[in-house]
């Protein structure tokens, strides 16, 4: 047999039994409009536990968002570094080609034939490509010797130049600073002996 549900009627069976405190059949407090549920120690403990769990999950979420941001930044840096390294690798492969074109032009000095002009045009185009890749050819003639940018292959006494000045470029340098493909091979002036 099923038990009756709902509020007991004052004139029905059990009308003479006392109604337990906190049940729906208890009359509402005068003027309150709605009865506030009473929270016992058990409910308070559960609320605190739930609030603690929410705070922990929020903290974990913030950490995960920060980690994703860090991974994104690290990936961007890695891609940029790989792009720079690959550009430098490709440009470095072209240096011997440009050097050989320079050598061919030096040997053909004075000959203004169409072949020489064609070689000169190809060399100029290759130098321009290196410049667009971020590795411009440096003109170091007359500049003070700088071991970060120059590689001294010999020294020479030159009364017309200050000591420590680049007086000849054997092989030009390309790039500058961290983007330097290679230093220039140069001849440096020394102090003249009197």
Image: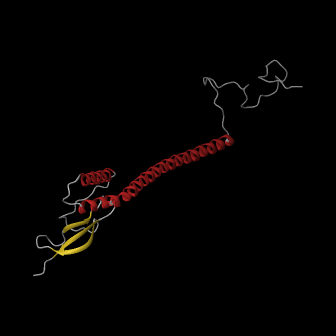
Give the image quarter of residue 108. bottom left
Identity of the residue drawn at 58% across and 45% down: 57
- Work out whether residue 80 or residue 123 is closer to the camera in this orientation and state it: 123
Identity of the residue drawn at 77% across and 28% down: 19
Report x, y in % for residue 102: 27, 60
Tell me if residue 175 comes above or below residue 41 in the rendering: below
- Work out whether residue 16 or residue 155 is closer to the camera in this orientation and state it: 155
Report x, y in % for residue 78: 45, 53
* The residue positioned farthest toward the right in the image shown: 1
Identity of the residue drawn at 85% across and 26% down: 3
- In the picture, which quadrant includes the N terminus? top right
Tell me if residue 155 comes above or below residue 104 in the rendering: below
User: Total marks drawn?
Assistant: 0
* The residue positioned farthest toward the top in the image shown: 11
94 sits to left or right of 16? left
- In the picture, which quadrant includes the C terminus? bottom left
Question: Coloured how?
Answer: secondary structure
Report x, y in % for residue 173: 28, 62
Report x, y in % for residue 124: 27, 52
Identity of the residue drawn at 36% across and 57% down: 94
115 sits to left or right of 3? left
């Amino acid at each position: 047999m099923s038990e009756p549900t709902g509020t007991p009627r004052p004139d029905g069976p059990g009308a003479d039994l006392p109604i337990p405190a906190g049940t729906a059949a208890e009359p509402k407090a005068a003027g309150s409009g709605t009865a506030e549920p009473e929270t016992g120690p058990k409910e308070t403990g559960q609320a605190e536990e739930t609030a603690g769990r929410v705070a922990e999950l929020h903290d974990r979420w913030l950490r995960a968002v920060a980690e994703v941001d860090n991974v994104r930044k690290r990936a961007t840096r890695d891609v940029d570094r790989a792009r720079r390294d690959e550009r430098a690798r490709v440009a470095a492969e072209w240096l011997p080609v440009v050097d050989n074109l320079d050598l061919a032009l030096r040997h053909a000095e004075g000959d203004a034939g169409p072949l020489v002009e064609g070689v000169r045009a190809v060399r100029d185009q290759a130098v321009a490509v290196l410049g667009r890749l971020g590795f411009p050819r440096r003109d170091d003639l007359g500049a003070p010797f700088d071991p970060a940018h120059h590689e001294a292959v010999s020294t020479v006494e030159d009364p017309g130049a200050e000591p420590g000045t680049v007086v000849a470029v054997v092989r030009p340098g390309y790039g500058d600073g961290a983007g330097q493909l290679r230093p220039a091979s140069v001849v440096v002036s020394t102090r003249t002996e009197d």
